[in-house]
Amino acid sequence: MKKYLSLILSPTMALSMIAPAVVSAEGNNKKLNNMVVFGDSIASGYGLSENEHTYSEICADYFGADLHNFAQSGLDSYELLDMINNLTDEQKTEVENTEVIVISTGGNDIMKYIVKQFLDFAGKNNLLVAGYTSADIPENPSTNDMKMIDQNAFREYSNSGLTATMNLNSLIKSTSRNLRLNTNNNRGIIPNEIMVNIDKTVNKIKEINPNTQIIVQTIYQPLQLSKSYVEKNYSDSHAMMINLLRDTLDSVMDTFRDELQKIQGIEIIDVYDTYTANGTVASSDDNPGHAYYFTDMEKSYVTIGGENSLNVHPNQKGHLAIASLLIDKIKVTNSETGESFKPDSAERPLDETTGEAVPTVFNQIYYSIEDIGDYPPLAMEQIVETIPDKFYPGDIDDDGLIDANDATAILIEYANLSTTGESTLTEEKSKKADANYDGIIDASDATQVLMYYAYLSTDHEDETLNIFGYMNKIQAEDNAK
């Protein structure tokens, strides 16, 4: 079912979509020259292998820009503000000269607080590994410090009965309130601390370079584990706690996004929404979101405690997804006229062996993804929307509709290919005919088109979904069965 529902790009189609437009050097006045990055381990590319690329590297290659990445793993919003207030001469020069600055921050503030609450809880309830006491708990711990918690003792405690369940629920809810709520009884870490630091950081950057575009990322929710993984690896009580934590973190990241929108002088890329990739489908046990696909959470140690740390960082697919958001968002402002425009993609050098243009890093990464068939449809829509020459599936006759005529055209083409081996469609129409992007034009493509046509033919209370949204809807319904 995944192959049928996933919106993946066949190699032929993907090449036309992902390959950048070639722009001649003459008259190219829409170039992005410089790009600066500040922030944490997400921006620095922590966890990527040597031959993998950060989202900023992908973007810089796409636009042909010089990249200066000053991100540091572990940096929180306080430390970022301190860095901006004490820029080196090199850093200040790059800030003065850049057209775009990308900031990733806030995640470490949130994670440090959450980890501290769980460690303190474990200390009070004798759930630490032998040799550790509450005195050993750092004031600003990292996820690595979760190894101090005795996972077996914690598991036994969480399974011990109603009192333990109530205590854990109280811990999670109080942690959420202190992160989100700006009241006398709650600390309000996001509105009162993180956002204040981001606002000061932005204002300081604007003092140095008032014309630069500042893009700030929302924070994705990493504890979106697939239903099958949770069922396989956790007891019922642990699964309940994970689901409660997931819902709580969803609320926390919603608050971060809402508060970020109040800051003046920035533009936002919504990594949280892209990684979740649920659209209008509410987060649930059946449809928790897709962060597990864009990180390696399900490949790392994900229970409480243990010797290994949680791998919550984006994998290469995750960096590609963020890059697609940035490519779509980045603009360059003419300092003389004040006009803003989307920069052109860079002219690609020619391969000396083949004589063909060297593909972008974006393109190379796309083709390297082995499980591209599992790429969430709504995130794939962002990929398609970002890249020039995009092709939407199904509309074979180019009349602006996806209907029975298109399904008939697909079946005719399938019959021709089955009998003569020769196509009767143009290259562009053939790409659209492969509606399920499995590289083959057959009856399943016609079936998919007819399913979507049937959907379009019915009344909808909400806005009519495009084909990406429809695929997501069917996938969500299938997960819920």
Image (cartoon, helix red, strand yellow):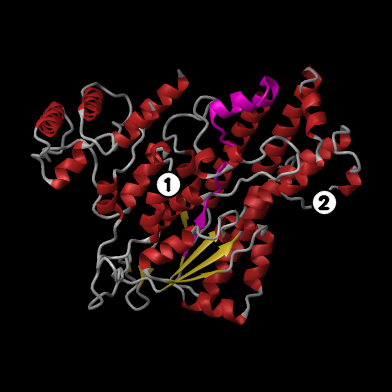
Disc 2 marks a residue whose amino acid type is: Pro
> CA–CA distance between discs 2 and 1?
39 Å
Disc 1 residue type (three-letter)? Ile
Q: Is residue 253 above or below residue 31?
A: above
Residue bearing the label numbered 1? 369
Question: Is 244 within the magenta?
Answer: no
Query: How many labels were placed on the picture?
Result: 2
Residue 40: % across, % down:
61, 58
**Depth order, front residue of 349/165:** 349
Q: Residues within 10 Å of mark 2 (few under 14, many from 20)?
A: some
Q: Is residue 266 visible?
A: no
Q: Quadrant of the C terminus?
A: top left
Q: Which residue matches tag 2?
A: 138
Marks 2 and 1 close (CB-CB < 8 Å): no
* Helix, strand or loop at mark 2: loop
Indicate left or right for 424 with 42 as reference.
Answer: left
Please determine whether, in this image, residue 37 is positioned above or below residue 334: above
From the top left corner, tell me how far across and down residue 12 is, in percent.
25, 48
Q: Is residue 25 left or right of residue 229?
A: left
Quarter where residue 120 is shown: top right
For mark 1, give the secondary structure.
Answer: loop
Q: Which disc number belongs to residue 333? A: none
Select label 2 or label 1 by which is in front: 1
Instruction: Report the residue at 88% width, 35% height from top.
Output: 124
Would you say residue 218 sits in the magenta stretch?
A: yes
Residue drawn 70% across the image and 35% down it: 303
Query: 296 or 70: nearer the eye?
Result: 296
Magenta residues, start to end: 214-239
Asked if residue 214 shows in the view, the reply is yes
Sequence-earlier tag: 2 or 1: 2
